[in-house]
Amino acid sequence: MTGIEALQSVQFVTVKGKRLAVLNAEDWEAFIEWAETLEDLQVARGALAELRAVGGDRKQAGWLERSPNVPLHDLHHS
């Protein structure tokens, strides 16, 4: 389920005069995952724009060099 689908699954109830949005936990988790993905994309786009602004020079863009002894998947989880 996408974040949009999760939002579309919201049901509204009125309790003590307040209108509340209700969705099940599974849909909420899907929405959070979708929002986190959007945030990651925004960060990546910003980093790419910075890299392009300095002509692709990773060092000038402030990117750290990866040690050849550290697998990429280990960097993701640090």
Image (cartoon, grey):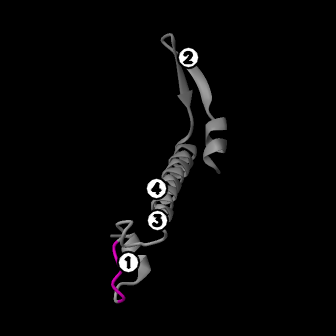
Tag 2: amino acid = Thr
In the shown orientation, is residue 22 left or right of residue 54? right
Q: Earlier in the sequence, mark 4 or mark 3?
A: 4
Q: Which mark is residue 20?
A: none
Q: Is residue 62 left or right of residue 17?
A: left
Query: Which mark's residue is nearer the viewer, 4 or 1?
Result: 4
How many angstroms separate mark 3 from mark 1 (CA)?
23 Å
Image location of residue 60, percent across then percent down: 36, 69
Q: What kind of element bears circle 3?
A: helix
Q: Is residue 61 above or below residue 33?
A: below
Region of the chain picked out in magenta, as a range: 64-68
**Residue 25's x, y, as percent?**
52, 44
Pointer 4 residue = 43
Q: Tell me which residue sits at (64%, 49%) in the image.
A: 2
Query: Which of the two discs, 3 and 1, labels the residue nearer the N terminus?
Result: 3
Q: CA distance from mark 4 to mark 1?
A: 19 Å
- Kindly identify which residue carries mark 1: 74
Q: In front of the other: label 2 or label 1?
A: 1
- Distance from disc 3 to disc 2, alpha carbons, whole Å, reads 50 Å
State the separation of the CA atoms marked 2 and 4. Answer: 38 Å
Type of amino acid at the residue the image marks with label 3: Leu
For the residue labelled by badge 2, is the local secondary structure a helix, a strand or a loop? strand
